[in-house]
Image (cartoon, coloured by chain):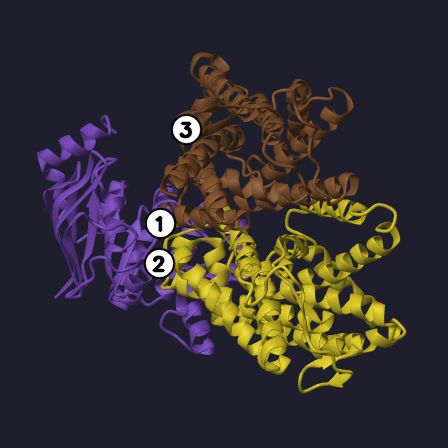
Amino acid sequence: MKTYSALGAAIALAAVPFLVGLNEYYLFLVTLILLYTTIVVAWQLIGGYGGQLDLGAGAYHGLGAVVTGFLMVNYGVSGWVGLLVSGAAAAGVAFLIGYPSFRLGLKEVWYALSSLALVLILQKIFLLWTDVAGPLERYIPYAEFDPVFMRAGTKIFYYYITAALLASTFLIVSRIRRSKTGLYLISIRENEEAAEMLGVDVRRYKLQALMIYSFIAAVTGGIYASMVGFYHPTLFDSWISIQTATLAIVGGLGHLLGPPIVSIILLTVQEYLRITLGAVIIGLHQVIFGIILVVIIMFKPDGLGPLIDSLARRFPASVRR
Amino acid sequence: MGADFGVQLLQTILFGVMLGGVYALAAMGLALLFGVANLVNFAHGEYIMLAMYMAFVFSVTIFQDPVLTPLFNIPLFFAIGVITYLGIFKRLIKAPPLSQIAATVGVLVLLRNLALAIWAAEPKAPPYTVFATSFSIGPIIVPLDKLLAMAVSFVTLFLLNLFLERTRLGVAMRASADDVEAVSLMGVDTNRLFLLTTGISLALVGLSGSLIMTYQAVTPTSGLLFGLLTWAIVALAGLGTVKGILIASIIFGLADSLASGLWDPRGREIVLYGLFILILWVRPKGLFGRR
Amino acid sequence: MDALVLEGISKNFGALAALTNVNMRVQVGEVVGLIGPNGAGKTTLFNIVTGFTKPDRGRVKLFGEDVTGLQPHQIAARGVARTFQIVKPFFGMTVYETVLVGAYLREKDEDNARQRAEVAMKLTGVYHLRNRYARELNTPQLKLVELARSLATQPKLLMLDEIVAGLTPAEVDAMTALVKRIRDEMGVTVLLVEHVMRFVMNISDRVVVLNYGEVIAEGSPSEVSSNLKVIEAYLGGKSGS
């Protein structure tokens, strides 16, 4: 059963470019949707399991874009290397901010606020740091098709990279969920003191979750920069932070399938609204998106995960019959 | 050179104090709601942004001068507070912090994009007020409108303090900040209490929106800046007293003014939020150990 | 051999002295009851031993090792488990998962951890609840789950903070039998804080009385209950109950 659904998901992911008729613009949109979904899935580690409402996604995503872009532009370093370096850099920043925060017992609203502050601080630092970024967009050298440099004219290249990243992120996260680390993280979310008394090194596990998630968020940023062909400090985007956390919550905190499914659906709806309404009134699509989020959070505080579960239970049964 | 720098420093400090005086009003609204109703309002900054936009709208349509906009903003935002409470906050009062954050982040998304849809991304500034003149004390220039904004803020905070200390309702609010259950056992209708608290909180926001407009224009992302700033002030001050909020606000006003004046206006957020994170590290529980 | 030694422990919260120069010993294999009126500092003492609170003065020694100032998870790693006065369940986890968290402390391998968890659940009688979520359980059940997850860590010293508070007399008797089994069959040393005299006097080898942060008496249950000073402090403090 599990292998079938995995196979189905893989085929679906592989087929998407053909379903959108290999249209470059649509390919760009679906790649974006998968990139943001990847961040949501990775966020589960710190937010869904660890219970820390992290709003730093924009910081790590931006760091990925800037570091990968900087290496590609200034040193001609392959984007693949850039992804790894920027992931490591993001994990390093996560450690620098996470270690004192967790050690000093920052949590709940205060943790959320401090992580959001990080996004804006990094944005301004890179705005002022003109050797690396600065107020002007920096363009990555164009290549028609250079898989080694990780640069291509067609978006399908980035689509498959992103699809592979999403799939591996999902596998990593579901593996961690089933492991001792996942169990420990959930126990921290449920009750820190009780977890600690059972021998859980609360700080260490929170930090681990934060570092893995920030690494993946940075990789999405690097792919993004290479795909659009430039980087800029505005890629330290607080909107990504907020979007990530809300989608994960709407999908169901700590639910494995809910967040990615909900992200893909809602982000698609958002893009659809943007294409149809965005031209009429700028921002209207996000007003509707905002209303959808508020309504779901108000009326389904546990998110849509449980709903998806019950649908999933019904579906195979009707097929078998 | 040295004398020039001295003058500039004094000027910057004056601006900082005046700015902090205005921030205090915005932060007080947050502290009140957080303290009395124990409610985490992540959208607080978005309400400030909305208040700035309304001040802009009233000043270009009805009044032609921003100085009268509080007359509309205060009752309007009290009403918005009542509506928000009945529609959203009421359900959240007893919810865990995570649900409160999630739902109010939803409100944040909604308001921010509503502003974007109506007013687009370009900054909006009100027309000049008749008070937009200045006088000098020696080499120091004192802008009259900003001085007035600070005075209005101080008077409001003074009245709020009287209200909290002298009236039955105010005392109930302070008691609720200490122990909600005890207050409800004393026969106070907490639902009504929280409704009024939300109303007052946002009425303060309405007024502060008008006052902040004397300093800067508004964009849809202003909400994030003022949201983080007011939370930072509350983190430093604790929920204890109006005086605490005032002192913390002036510290942040000074940091803001010094960063912009002596370093780089684009660096002010680095200083303000960096200070915020440091405060959180030093006082991780915030608010004298509450929450 | 001493399981736990407290040397001159003092702790103030502001102007309030929670504990003043407390000296105490728990020998390996003993069941020691800690009693005293509300506010006597019993829970503070538990928090100091388990690392949640740092003492102002004094040392905590576990099995001969000075552990003062260590963090709770480090204390747990040294063989201490505890239950909480107000239960701290993992509401979003099943009973099985909850107990498994404890089992992972000493069993790195998943299969072994599962076996260990099952043993602990069977011993405490919550095995039939293993697939239920903690949020579906009542308080007596939650207390048993808390005991099960503590036992799954394979402790050498088990600290029970008012484990029978709120239980019916029949449940108290069952708990008495259970704690005796834990001591006898698993060789676990037990330190318990309790208000329910029937439980303490039945189960303890030795009783220590705290009052206003000081040890005022200790001895066998019969010695202590006949000690007038204790009756004054304890029963007087509880207005003749």
Real-space CA distance between mark 3 and mark 1, rounded to the nearest whole angstrom: 25 Å
Please name the amino acid that badge 3 sits on: Asp
Disc 1: which residue? C84
| In contact (CB < 8 Å): disc 1 and disc 2 | yes
Where does the image place residue C65, in percent across and percent down from the top left?
17, 66
The nearer-to-camera label among 1 and 2 is 2
The nearer-to-camera label among 2 and 3 is 3
Disc 3: which residue? B178
Same chain for marks 3 and 1?
no
| In contact (CB < 8 Å): disc 3 and disc 1 | no
The nearer-to-camera label among 3 and 1 is 3
Q: In this view, does B137 lie above or below A224?
A: above
Q: What tint does the image give chain A?
A: yellow
At 41% from the left and 35% from the top, the residue drawn is B7
Q: Which disc is residue A197 wearing?
A: 2
| SS of the residue under disc 1 | loop
Q: How crowded is mark 2: few (under 14 residues within 10 Å), some or many (20 or more)?
A: many
Same chain for marks 1 and 2?
no
Chain identifier, purple in the render:
C
Please name the amino acid that badge 2 sits on: Met
At 60% from the left and 66% from the top, the residue drawn is A42
At 30% from the left and 57% from the top, the residue drawn is C179
| SS of the residue under disc 3 | helix
Which chain is indicated by disc 2?
A: A
Residue A147 found in image quarter: bottom right
Where does the image place residue A164, in percent across and percent down from the top left?
69, 78
Q: Residues within 10 Å of mark 1 (few under 14, many from 20)?
A: many
Which chain is indicated by disc 3?
A: B
Chain identifier, brown in the render:
B
Same chain for marks 2 and 3?
no
Q: Is residue B132 above or below residue A90?
A: above
Q: In this view, does B139 lie above or below C23?
A: above
